[in-house]
Image (cartoon, rainbow, N blue to C red):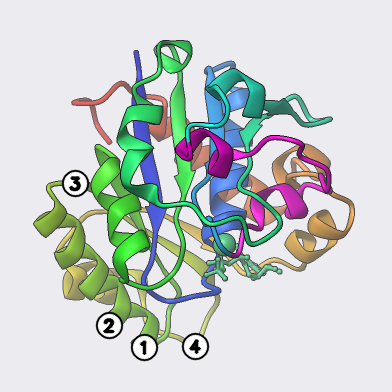
C-alpha cells in the first residue's frame, strides 16, 4: 500500500539523509517495496552519499513538469530505488510534491522523503506534502529544541508525526527518555554514534548493506522492521 514518510528536522546536519538512506535500505533488505526520494531541492545530498553523480533527470524536472516520475527513478548498486534532486541549482518548488507522491508507480511502495533543513517555505511545503513524518534529533539541547519546533510545524501542516528518531546517540548526553518526554511524541528508535557511517559514505554504500553487523546497522534494521508494519499498526 502506498505510504510516504518524511524524515525531517529543522536543524541541519543531524542525519536526515543518512537516516533516509539507511531506513530505506533496511526496509529493502526486509523485502519491502521502498523508494528513497531526495526533496532537498537546493542542497541535494542523497545521491551524492550513494556515490551517484550523474542524473540526467531529477525530482526538480518532475516538479517543473519537464519529466515523468519513472524517468527520474534510479537503482543504486545496492538495489535501492532512489529519486534524486538536482545536483545543480535548478530552481524548483516543492508545491507539486504531493501529486508526485500519489503517482500510480508508487502505489505498492513506501516512499521515504529526505527533507531539507529549516522551516522555510520549501521545507514546509515538503512537510505538508507528506502524509507522515519521522522527526530526527540528536541528543543536544539545540537539536531537541528544533525537533520540538518541527513537531509543531508538522502538526500545523496536517502531517501525522509517527514519532522521533534519536540519531548519533552516545553516553554523557541527554537521555532518550528525557528527549521523548520533552518532545511529547513516541521515541521510535535510537541510532548510536558510529564511525562506520562516515566510512560507508566514503564507500558509497548504505551502512546496513556494507556492514550489517555495525551497531548503527542493527539500530536501523530494528527501526526499519517496525516501519514495515502497515500504517495504523504499531508505528
Ligand atoms: N549515527 C551517526 N554516527 C556517526 N555519524 C553520523 C551519524 N549520523 C550521521 N552522521 C554523520 O553526520 C553527517 C551529516 O549527516 P546528514 O548529511 O545525513 O545530515 P542532514 O540532516 O541530512 O544534513 P542537512 O540538514 O545538511 O541535509 C554525515 O556525513 C555523517 O558522517
Ligand atoms: Mg540532508
Residue range corresponding to the magenta coloring: 43-64
The residue labelled by disc 1 is: 142
The residue labelled by disc 4 is: 172
Per the model, the C-alpha gap separating discs 1 and 4 is 16 Å
**Residue at point 45%, 31% (across, down):** 111
Q: Residues within 10 Å of mark 2 (few under 14, many from 20)?
A: some
Q: Nearer the viewer, mark 1 or mark 3?
A: 3
Is residue 138 shown left or right of residue 141? right
Is residue 137 shown left or right of residue 221? left
The residue labelled by disc 3 is: 159
| Mark positioned earlier in the residue sequence (2 or 4) | 2
The residue labelled by disc 2 is: 145
Q: Residues within 10 Å of mark 4 (few under 14, many from 20)?
A: few
- Identify which residue, 68 or 84, lies in the foreground: 68
Q: Is residue 55 magenta?
A: yes
Per the model, the C-alpha gap separating discs 2 and 4 is 18 Å
Q: Is residue 27 magenta?
A: no
Q: Is ligand 1 less than 8 Å from the beta carbon at label 4?
A: no
Is label 2 in a helix, a strand or a loop?
Answer: helix
Q: Marks 1 and 2: CB-CB under 8 Å?
A: yes
**Percent x, y of residue 112:** 47, 38
Q: Marks 2 and 3: CB-CB under 8 Å?
A: no
User: In what quadrant does ligand 1 lie?
Assistant: bottom right
Amino acid at each position: 500500500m502506498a505510504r510516504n514518510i518524511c524524515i525531517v528536522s529543522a536543524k541541519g546536519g543531524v542525519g536526515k539523509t543518512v537516516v533516509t538512506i539507511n531506513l530505506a535500505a533496511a526496509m529493502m533488505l526486509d523485502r519491502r517495496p521502498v523508494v528513497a526520494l531526495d526533496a532537498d531541492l537546493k542542497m541535494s545530498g542523497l545521491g551524492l552519499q550513494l556515490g551517484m553523480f550523474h542524473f540526467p533527470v531529477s525530482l526538480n524536472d518532475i516538479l517543473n513538469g519537464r519529466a515523468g516520475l519513472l524517468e527520474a527513478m534510479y537503482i543504486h548498486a545496492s538495489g535501492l530505488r532512489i529519486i534524486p534532486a538536482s545536483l545543480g541549482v535548478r530552481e524548483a518548488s516543492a508545491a507539486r510534491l504531493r501529486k508526485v507522491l500519489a503517482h500510480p508507480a508508487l502505489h505498492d511502495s513506501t516512499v521515504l522523503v529526505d527533507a531539507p533543513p529549516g522551516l522555510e517555505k520549501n521545507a514546509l511545503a515538503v512537510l505538508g506534502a507528506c502524509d507522515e513524518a519521522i522527526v530526527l534529533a540528536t541528543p543536544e539541547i539545540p537539536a531537541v529544541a528544533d525537533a520540538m519546533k518541527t513537531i509543531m510545524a508538522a502538526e500545523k501542516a496536517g502531517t501525522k508525526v509517527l514519532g522521533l528518531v534519536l540519531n548519533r546517540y552516545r553516553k554523557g548526553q541527554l537521555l532518550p527518555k528525557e528527549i521523548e518526554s520533552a518532545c511529547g511524541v513516541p521515541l521510535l528508535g535510537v541510532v548510536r554514534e558510529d564511525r562506520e557511517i562516515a566510512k560507508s559514505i566514503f564507500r558509497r554504500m548504505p551502512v546496513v548493506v556494507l556492514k550489517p553487523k555495525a551497531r548503527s546497522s542493527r539500530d536501523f534494521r530494528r527501526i526499519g522492521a517496525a516501519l514495515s508494519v502497515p500504517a495504523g499498526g504499531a508505528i
